[in-house]
Image: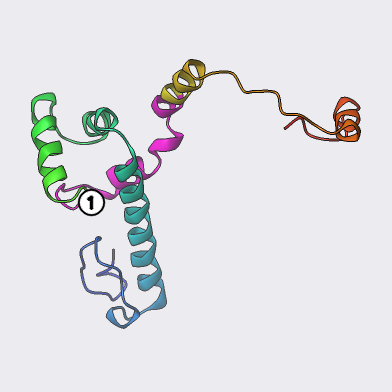
Amino acid sequence: MAERRGGKKRRIQDEPERSDYKSEMAYKDALRKYETYRAAQRVWRQVTPEEKAWILETYTRFKKDEIQAALEIDAATGGDLSGFRLTRKQIRAIAKYPRSQHRREIYKLHLAASPARKDVRVRKHEKRLQQSGLRRPW
């Protein structure tokens, strides 16, 4: 897409520079792709190895027997997604993983396993406001 709008082809891992693009639209496209890639990188660094394996199995071309080797290579290269040849669709899927149903289920299990929230002492007037519905309960 960058070629059609007057920019040179760049790797998505490199931050775009305004001088590399003929039009503002091409620069903004490249910047949007780069920001999506950075979001996917932040998610990738935070997820557990089990979740990484699930992501690779679900969203990429890797087969089950190749996933462990791919994760080892990724860990050796610093875990920044640059070792994988990912499409834009796969990068968007990784960036949106925290909002996926799979991650929500993991979080629900985590909350169920954790102890219940403790009741916090509240001043009398705040308690009355809460009971009358004028304050949020947290």
27 is higher (above) or lower (below) than 109:
below
Q: Quadrant of residue 98?
A: top left
Numbered disc total: 1
Q: Is residue 88 above or below residue 55?
A: below
Q: Nearer the viewer, residue 137 or 51?
A: 137
**Which coloring applies here?**
rainbow
Residue 95 lies in the magenta-colored region: yes
Is 13 or 27 nearer to us in this picture? 13
Quarter that holds the N terminus = bottom left
Label 1: which residue?
A: 80
The residue drawn where x is 39% and y is 25% is 102
Q: For this view, does 61 lie left or right of residue 90?
A: left
53 above or below 38? above
* Residue 7 in which image quadrant: bottom left
Side of 55 relative to 25 (left or right):
left
* Residue 56 spot, x, y in % from top left: 22, 34
Where is residue 67 shown, x and y percent of the image?
A: 13, 31
Image spot of residue 69 (x, y percent): 8, 34
| Residue at horizontal 14 percent and vertical 49 percent from the top | 83
Question: Which of 8 and 84 lies nearest the eye of the viewer?
Answer: 84
Q: Give the range drawn in magenta.
A: 82-104
Q: Is residue 87 on the magenta stretch? A: yes
| Horizontal relation, residue 49 to residue 120: left or right | left
Q: Does the magenta stretch mainly form a helix, a strand or a loop?
A: helix
Residue 118 in percent (x, y) is at 65, 23
Residue type pointed to by label 1 = Asp
